[in-house]
């Protein structure tokens, strides 16, 4: 591995979500979270799943990750049925979930603990590369309580990328950050995606965020969640969330979203 090129990335995986439905049942109630969801994501594609709160976005992400099993339907990753969590499909959550007893370097190294065939020196080199990738090399010895919200999410991103997953699943990772920090991370994530070419599925309720980041936006209906419409996003990267191009596409999607919410009411 060279210091400039970084480690060779595993080939991104293609995802196929077929006729996925999910219910959450208790003795007193049954919630129909997802209904006959279908979604194809090409290898190396960046897809944003957008919808109102409670539409099942996070449930869909959990099913793709293998953290939750569907009641009907299936998910395939490169034609292999997803039956549970796997090291090639990693999730980055809204909260950084960093270990407070480890410093930034230790947290990234922790993500490499199950990487097979690597020496200790190789693990350290990979961790250093990803800290540079997310701009945290100078903070490698810092602990969680010493980091800003944006720095925590950078550290979480480095920890997620270091094991070289073929799919990165992101569950509203920027929702709790202030506007300026989010906008900088939008640029950073686009740069990292261009460099590492991972398959990324990001769920969000922020329309402009979805347009800024995604190759495609899949719009979900209110509960039970269904993929009701998809929008291709063509402006070249890096995209600025404040441009007229992003605003125009976001307005189209917002109008479609309002239509779905009216139909559900």
Image (cartoon, grey):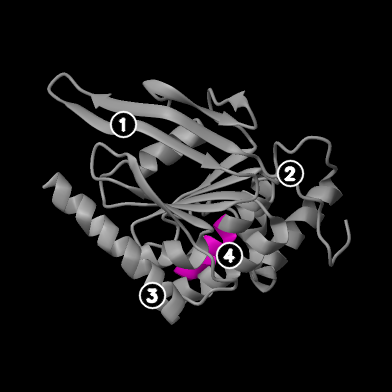
Which one is closest to the eye, mark 3 or mark 2?
Answer: 3
Question: Is residue 11 covered in magenta?
Answer: no
Residue 130 place in picture, x, y as percent: 70, 60
- Residue pointed to by mark 4: 189
Q: Secondary structure at mark 3?
A: helix
Q: CA distance from mark 4 to mark 1?
A: 31 Å
- Name the residue rendered at 35%, 27% in the picture: 21
Q: Secondary structure at mark 4?
A: helix
Residue 78 place in picture, x, y as percent: 65, 32
In magenta, the rendered stretch is 147-156
Residue 90 lies left or right of residue 231; in this view the side is right
- Residue pointed to by mark 1: 35
Whichever of callouts 4 and 2 sits on the residue coming sooner in the sequence is 2
Q: Secondary structure at mark 1?
A: strand
The circle drawn on residue 247 is 3
Whichever of callouts 1 and 3 sits on the residue coming sooner in the sequence is 1
Which one is closest to the eye, mark 4 or mark 1?
Answer: 1
Whichever of callouts 4 and 1 sits on the residue coming sooner in the sequence is 1
Question: Is residue 153 covered in magenta?
Answer: yes
- Residue pointed to by mark 2: 11
Res 177 visible: no
Q: Nearer the viewer, residue 61 or 258?
A: 258
Which one is closest to the eye, mark 2 or mark 1?
Answer: 1
């Amino acid at each position: 591995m060279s210091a400039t090129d970084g480690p060779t990335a595993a080939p991104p995986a293609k995802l196929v979500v077929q006729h996925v439905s999910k219910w959450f049942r208790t003795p007193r109630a049954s919630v129909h979270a997802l209904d006959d969801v279908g979604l194809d994501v090409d290898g190396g594609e960046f897809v944003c799943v957008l919808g109102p709160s409670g539409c099942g976005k996070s449930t869909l992400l959990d099913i793709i990750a293998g953290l939750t099993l569907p009641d009907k339907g299936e998910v395939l990753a490169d034609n292999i049925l997803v039956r549970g969590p796997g090291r090639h499909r990693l999730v980055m959550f809204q909260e950084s979930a960093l270990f407070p007893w480890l410093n930034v370097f230790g947290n990234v190294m922790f993500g490499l603990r199950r990487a097979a065939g690597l020496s200790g020196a190789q693990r350290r080199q990979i961790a250093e590369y990803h800290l540079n990738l997310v701009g945290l090399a100078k903070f490698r010895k810092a602990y969680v309580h010493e980091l800003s919200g944006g720095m925590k999410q950078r550290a979480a991103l480095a920890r997620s990328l270091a094991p070289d997953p073929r799919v990165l699943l992101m569950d509203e990772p920027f929702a709790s950050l202030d506007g300026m920090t989010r906008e900088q991370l939008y640029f950073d994530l686009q740069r990292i995606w261009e460099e590492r070419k991972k398959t990324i599925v990001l769920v969000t309720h922020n329309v402009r965020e979805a347009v800024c980041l995604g190759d495609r936006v899949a719009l979900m209906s209110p509960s039970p969640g269904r993929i009701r419409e998809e929008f291709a996003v063509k402006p070249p990267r890096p995209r600025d969330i404040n441009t007229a191009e992003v605003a125009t596409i976001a307005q189209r999607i917002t109008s479609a979203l309002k239509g779905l919410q009216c139909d559900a009411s």
